[in-house]
Amino acid sequence: MLYLKNGYLIDPASGTEGYRDIIIKEDKIFRILPQGETAMAAETKDKGGEENTEIIDLKGQYVAPGLVDVHVHFRDPGFTHKEDIFTGARAAAKGGFTSVVLMANTKPAVDNPETLSYVMNKGSQTDIHIYTCANVTKGLLGKELTDMEGLSRSGAVGFTDDGIPLMDEGLLREALRRAARCGKPVSLHEENPALITNNGVNAGKASRHYGIGGSPREAEISMVERDLRIAVEEEADLSIQHISTKEAVELVRQAKKRSGHIYAEAAPHHFTLTEEAVMKYGPLAKMNPPLREEPDRLAVIEGLRDGTIDMIATDHAPHSAQEKAKPLTEAPSGIIGLETSLSLGIRELVKKNYLSMSELIRKMSLAPARLYGFDAGYVAEGGPADLVVFDPGREWVADTFVSKSANSPFTGERMPGVISYTICGGKVVYGSF
């Protein structure tokens, strides 16, 4: 057994906050007890004895459900020079994540049972829970739907062509219908390419700084407006990915009043940075959708605060140093995020009094788990022994990463929230005794 003593438990599902001792037996939480070794001794008596129990004194650190990220790119298969499933899983564990959902824009794409099986089998060899979406359309071409029913039966937890918007309205409508019959959500990347000259940079101050066209806010707004309308009509689960504009936040807010099937995610960079970061960091702050203006950043925060935006998802997007060293218009979009996400949430949302710590943990665990129906995101007796232990009062420097890539504008920054342990399936997968 594993005994965690003197931890400050935060469970967003039950609303529990306070000092507790937690006993883990195999891959489940066996007991949650009042703080103190005497309680542990009583519970372990006649069950193997304390000598067979590993004890970790958390010394007042926070213990919470293992984090759940429903939007990551592990680049496997096809682009494993950037990341692979094994290195991505280690980066996730370092960041406190015990469950992640992989996007399907790999090479080959996850539009067939063989590639789906490859990803799932490799994921099963890691120390955390790896899930994957499958593609909505074959080859990410936006022309023909995949066998969504068959892919669902084979283990896909949702559907997305992330990185490429679905431009055919009829195709999207049918995809939502099929996904609804499978009981799976569809997650959409919302940028109309017809309105974009150079993606990854906001059409505004940043694009003028570089003398390029950029991505106007209307590219996101128009797609979000259309897709929410269709999803409400079809009563299908739809998640708006990495929302970046104040107008899109308001569209989601209003759509949620008409339907209980609408969800949205925010990436840490969109509630932390604005387009000025692109002018400072160049390609290291280039991403799709791009960093916007200060009113947009504040609107994303307000969406998180009032429940319009359900969850925080990193959009962890590794690229090699050589790729990011290219000129701005040639460098790929995206930044890594798994190892800095919790710290940014603490720094930008909790310490600035937008969210409580429990609300932040809900956005990063329980809410994303509920969207996909995972047995995760809560701490309860008989529940999964997936936990993160962290100290919000200690700081660390983001100078090294477990990910294969290091494309982050946050490199070198001091951040609050040192993660001491990540426990998945009852085993310590990050940290040490």
Image: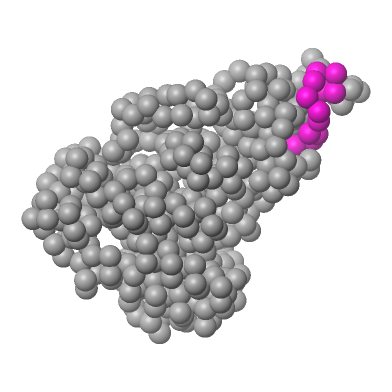
Image spot of residue 25 (x, y percent): 76, 32
Q: Please state which of residues 125 and 378 is positioned toward the viewer in this rendering.
A: 378
Q: Quadrant of the N terminus?
A: top right
Q: In which quarter of the image is the C terminus?
A: top right
**Is 308 part of what is drawn in magenta?**
no
Could you tell me which residue is drawn at 52 percent across and 53 percent down? 305
How many numbered marks does the figure carry? Answer: 0
Left or right of 130 on screen, residue 45: right
Task: Answer whether residue 375 is visible to the viewer in this image.
Answer: yes
Question: Where 46 sits versus 171, above or below?
Answer: above
Could you tell me which residue is drawn at 57 percent across and 20 percent down? 432
Image spot of residue 91 (x, y percent): 44, 36
Q: Please state which of residues 285 and 186 is positioned toward the viewer in this rendering.
A: 285
Q: Quadrant of residue 106?
A: bottom left
Question: Where 338 sits versus 374, above or below?
Answer: above
Question: Where 91 sits versus 391, above or below?
Answer: below
Q: Quadrant of residue 99?
A: top right
> Seen from this angle, which residue lies furthest right?
46
Q: Please state which of residues 297 and 383 is positioned toward the viewer in this rendering.
A: 297
Left or right of 100 on screen, residue 219: left
Task: Answer whether residue 177 is visible to the viewer in this image.
Answer: no
Segment tinted magenta in the rendering: 25-40
Could you tell me which residue is drawn at 56 percent across and 77 percent down? 258
